[in-house]
Amino acid sequence: MTTRQKSHDSSTSAASNLRLYDTASHKVEPFAPLKPGEVGIYVCGATVQSSPHVGHIRAAVAFDVVRRWLMRLGYKVTFIRNDTDVDDKIIAKAEAAGQQWWERAYIYEREFTHAYDALGVLPPTYEPRATGHILDMVDLIQRIIDNGHAYVLKDADGKPSGDVYFDVASWPEYGALTHQESGTLAADDNAAVADRMGPSVDAEGEDKYNPGDAADSSEQKHDPRDFALWKSPKASDPQTARWQTPFGIGRPGWHIECSAMSHRYLGDSFDIHGGGLDLRFPHHENEMAQSHAAGWGFAKHWMHSAWVTEKGEKMSKSLGNGLAVTTVLDAYPAWVVRYALASVQYRSMLEWSDQTLNEAASAFDRIANFVERAGAALGSQPGRDEVRDVDADALPHDFVAAMNEDINVAGAMACVFAAIRSGNTLLSQLDDRLRDESQLDALRELLLQLRAMLDVFGLDPLDAQWASGASSEAEDARETVLDTLIREQLNARAQARADRDFTRADAIRDALNNAGVLIEDTPGGSSWSLKH
């Protein structure tokens, strides 16, 4: 095994030095998995009610980078990302559009999957749907009831009504994640931003946790802070969105879904729970409370990605500044969009603008240009398998140190461009007449490390993920340059003919013809094409 190959036992010094910010403790702390060599991650996915926008995908890309770094450190990562495929908004929007709720959910689930794929987000180990885990939720709710931390409301006949609430007062640890005494007091600056912009606002800027919902507005609740584990149906709810349970007919509350699904695939305790910053309260706070009340250890570590802003405002549909992923990808290559999303540390707000994307496009030009020139000088490129197998300990020390300090991508990206500057110096020193093998070896090692660093961000330009887009972009650029050069010659030929300098005009035509360019003269001017 070479020094570049992964040991897959996470015993490297790089793995032992990883530190991550924990939302619950508000500290950057050393990370150690519950099970040596393995990491379990659960990230809250989309409520599949409408098309994805850049704000949604930012969280997906942010945790994709975290996952890729853990894998580079040698960990076996089990990555679970759920879909919420039944809730009030899905049902209401489906009815308004003349759709079945499950039809609408599946349409937009596919759109999200396409967006993830287009931007190089690795597929999760598994992607469960909420509706596939109703029995798990029922079992979990019963467990919480049996432990004395939830209660069932009764109807007029004294029978279970279908409404079940978590009893917040029975759980003294409530607020442990966000450190809120009343459910509204923010614990730190980022939390303050999240709470000011609305703990009831989801990643689309729409009401996610709605106190006006039938199940959450009952006057029978013991405490205003109590939240729904199971909800009796509204009169307008279709029969297909109702399930029979010991608590009565209804459907799940939002928070119970993720507790049940994370437990199904990751067990009583797992390493990391992630999601967008706006999910801290109430969603993740409630998840933590109900899972601990069930007797589970649940998430050891909490990570939250900040959102995307435009002119300082959170990107959301309700503010009119949401950017659909399809719209952005029509205007910019996918690699460029991925770079714009991945090159900002996950806890930092990302300001979205044309400047952001233009800077990403310039970065692509610098990176792709060097990678192409270095490969040409070497006569070949390192293979993708070789790039993937570079161990974290074989990467530049500064890069590893940056990534290990809470995924500091700004510091890591600085190392990427430092490597490109060093590589350009090596290229300038190569003598075509006398190829120095030591220089070539140094260039190849640098190129391999560079592409491995880029691969941590999902940005290796030679990854097949980007091949078609990069090829098309490069082809378009070559076509533009070629047309410009040939047009200059055609204009010179036209001027020569106007000056009755036919000798020069014929010479230009013959030179172009010898180069493989066919000229067709028409009354409207001359056009060109390449010989086949």
Image: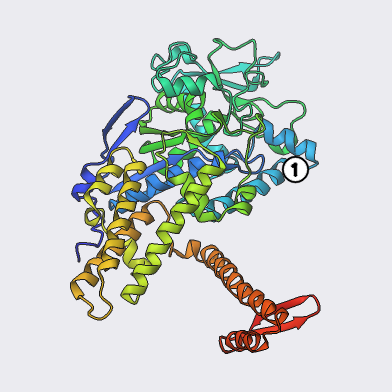
Left/right placement of residue 321 relative to residue 468 reads right
Vertical side of 337 occupied by 23: above or below = above
The N terminus, quarter of image: bottom left
Could you tell me residue 374's position as x and y percent?
Answer: 34, 68
Residue 65 in view, yes or no: yes
Picture mark count: 1
Left/right placement of residue 11 relative to residue 485 reads left
Instruction: Please tell me whether mark 1 sits on a helix, a strand or a loop.
Output: loop
Q: Quadrant of residue 203?
A: top right
Left/right placement of residue 432 relative to residue 67 reads left
The C terminus, quarter of image: bottom right
Q: Nearer the viewer, residue 63 or 460?
A: 460
Could you tell me residue 334's position as x and y percent?
Answer: 54, 55
Vertical side of 17 occupied by 187: above or below = above
Q: Nearer the viewer, residue 444 or 54?
A: 444
| Mark 1: amino acid | Gln
Tell me the residue at 27%/62% (across/down): 425
Q: Which residue is label 1 attached to?
A: 100
Left/right placement of residue 66 relative to residue 210 reads left
Q: Nearer the viewer, residue 161 or 101?
A: 101
Vertical side of 189 occupied by 132: above or below = below
Q: Residues within 10 Å of mark 1 (few under 14, many from 20)?
A: some
Could you tell me residue 121's position as x and y percent?
Answer: 48, 52
Tell me the residue at 53%/14% (across/down): 225
Tell me the residue at 24%/47% (across/down): 398
Vertical side of 254 occupied by 116: above or below = below
Residue 383 in view, yes or no: no
Q: Nearer the viewer, residue 433 or 337?
A: 433
Could you tell me residue 527's position as x and y percent?
Answer: 71, 78
